[in-house]
Image (tube, rainbow, N blue to C red):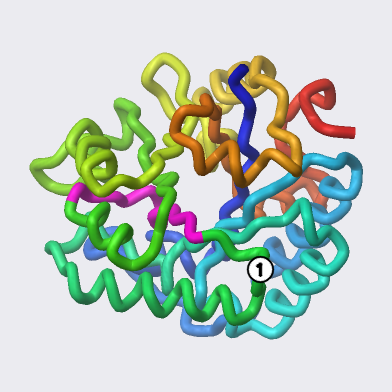
Amino acid sequence: MTKTWLTVDCDDFRHIPKYQGHPTRSKKQIDSNQLSEQFAAGIVGFEKWFDSHNSPITLFVIADSLQNEEFRNWLLKLISSYPKRITVGCHGLTHRSWSAWPEDVDGFQTAITQACEQIKSVVGESFRPWFRAPAGYMAPWMADVLYQSGIILDSSINDTLLTKSKAGKGNSWAKVRQSVREASLVEREWATKWGLPINGPALSIFPLSLIAKQAWKNLPPVVKTDDLISSVEDSNVPIKTVYWHLLDHGKSSGKWQPPIPQSILNH
């Protein structure tokens, strides 16, 4: 039976391609690592929502976020309060959109190795060698580098009509999928509907938001905490992967919640 994997990306505004990591989209960098007001509200809102059920969540963390003491301490407190329900994956050293740049195997391998080391040094046993490409920019050449860097699971493929370019110039999601398979990685693609995205920004961008919210209403039950790791790391287990941003919880005066039916959550 298919289960749903709930995942949250921990980007702040300074990380998004508008400000960081993209050769053409990044226009003005935000140098301060201070948390934005919405992000600070988001971590409070997320914890309130998280406390309302017993389902597990995987947080994909950017290593440089841990340089901020407030976020680092909050993450450690969250893990301490919910040690079995929180897993932490790697969302990069920074939020560099690797497939938008020329191929750089050495640079990528260095970044992934450092990112995993830094994240694991903070969160300890809550870390899992799972990767999500920043902003979903994932090229075929990146798969083998991930494997060589100790990653066993990738969750970057967003095979939709609107995200073809994120596989890199001259590439396709089919090529990314093939490279992931050849690298012996488990791939957990993002859920889609009608060839359109339903995760992350799609939850807030009209009219995609209408399609996304309708799709989320029909999600299968969320995987149970005790089964999470064994299920998502087993390519033979069918999993539907959804994600949103920690920042989202800062919307609507901190009252925003993901459109997940209460009936599929663990209580």
Q: Amino acid at mark 1?
A: Glu
Answer with left or right where residue 252 lies relative to residue 242: right
- Counting from the top left corner in percent of width and height, residue 36 is at 65, 70
Disc 1 secondary structure class: helix
- Counting from the top left corner in percent of width and height, residue 75 is at 73, 70
Q: For mark 1, what is the residue?
A: 125
Q: Quadrant of the N terminus?
A: top right
- Of residues 62 and 151, the one nearer the viewer is 151
Eyeballing the image, is 87 above or below 30?
above
Eyeballing the image, is 41 above or below 69?
above
Quarter location, residue 239: top right
- Of residues 48 and 267, the one nearer the viewer is 267
Q: Residue at x 25, y 48 (%)?
A: 183
Q: Residue at x 83, y 33 (%)?
A: 266
The stretch in magenta equals 129-140
Q: Quadrant of the C terminus?
A: top right
- Of residues 252 and 147, the one nearer the viewer is 147
- Counting from the top left corner in percent of width and height, residue 17 is at 38, 60
Q: Residue at x 60, y 42 (%)?
A: 230
Total numbered labels: 1
